[in-house]
Image: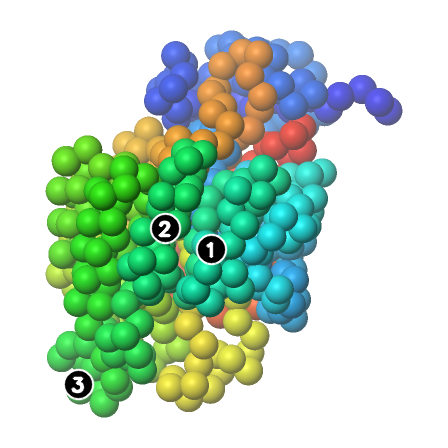
Amino acid sequence: SNQPMTILLKQVTIADPQSKHNGLTTDILIDGGVIASIESNISEKADHTLACHGAFVSTGWVDVFSNFCDPGFEFKETLQSGMAAAAAGGYTRVLVMGDTKPVTDNKAQVAYINAAGTNSNVTLHPIGAVTKKMEGQSLAEMYDMRASHAVAFSDGMHPVQSPGVFLKALQYVKAFDGILIQIPIDKTIAANGLMHEGIVSTQMGLPGLPAVAEELMVKRDIDLLRYTGSKLHITGVSSATTIELIRSAKKEGLAISCSVTPTHLFYCDEDMTTYNTNLKVIPPVRTKADRDALRAAVVDGTIDCIASHHAPQDWDHKVCEFEYAEFGNIGLQTTYSALEQTVPGLQPEQISNLLSGNARQIFALPTVSIEEGQAAELTIFNRTEMTTLTPENNKSKSSNSAFMNQSLTGKVIATINKGILTN
């Protein structure tokens, strides 16, 4: 039939600091992709009824940094398989980085990614390259890409190394109130580093990547940010010193924000003695003290977002000697439960902000709220149910997860976006 679909959520608790119903356990009726009513008891019959006892509903989750490998590396992931993994992980929007072949450094590439998410349950937001071909030399056509709806700019796994080029980029995006995303790694320091430089790397006999390679980059970028008065998001923060630098830059009033990955919240370098290539990430997982500082920074709000850094790698690039394995792991389906597992005691509103609200604000995405008459873009999650990523329920084309077959606390029940229920 052509009737819009109706979805009824029974007894769900609203976790949305923007909503006047925040904290309320209630029924929500969705009709044709819009929240039709929020009442303590709705008895009318719907096409889909979800019993949500014990579950929370927040605005749809946003991942701020995922690699979908498409075009060019479709054997690792496609936009379709990436969106399937995202929906299963509770996401309604994903910022897709441009480390593809060709690189997302022009409006045609931006349009390709945008189009894939148009009629899907997941909205895709392309991240344009800062420099042409991500070579770090000359600026890409950021203005054109912005006009074609690129939401931010980043050279992804090739963070801009030249201070002069990065300065120009900050000035350039400031003209249209744009934002740059940077992974904090100075590649001139320990270019061959495979893991955090410390006692464990020495014991394992692996070349180290010292925290100073990250901290120098963060210091430099904060200096350039201050000079330009532009906007910067640092993703993949991994050291306690980095957190301190960002905390004081925020106090100073600079437009700086940051995200941490589930891998960095969950693991530290002591977990790498098994040479698990799925823990080989950039920046590397650091010491237990660093990890604990990251957890504390999530609680106190210094860290704005949890970013999956979803980085699919095929079998050949992961099941090999540690030295030759590619960096990165898949993470979209386990990000929420890894957060719940590592930072217990968060308020429902904090989870909502870390996975949705803050990213929407930072990247100027549509702000939705759980109110009557608003578009229904929602994620329903249960904080106490357990979940396990297995080869059977993994939606990604790749299986390089740091959490495969691990039982974790916290389960995504469903997403609702554009009138589509995914559960």
Identify the image quadrant of the N terminus: top right
Q: Residue at the location (55% across, 82% down)?
A: 316
Reply above or below: 34 against 403. above
Query: Secondary structure under badge 1?
Result: loop
Reply above or below: 231 against 285. above
- Asked if disc 3 and disc 1 are in contact, CB closer than 8 Å, the reply is no
Query: Secondary structure under badge 3?
Result: helix
Q: How is the image coloured?
A: rainbow
Residue at the disc numbered 2 = 168
Residue 151 is labelled as: none
Q: Earlier in the sequence, mark 3 or mark 2?
A: 2
Q: Is residue 71 visible?
A: yes
Query: Which residue is the extreme one toward the right?
Result: 1
Residue 325 screen position, x and y as percent: 44, 81
Residue at the disc numbered 3 = 202
- Asked if disc 1 and disc 2 are in contact, CB closer than 8 Å, the reply is yes
Residue 381 screen position, x and y as percent: 46, 37
The Cα atoms of the two marked residues, 3 and 2, are separated by 39 Å
Residue 168 screen position, x and y as percent: 36, 50
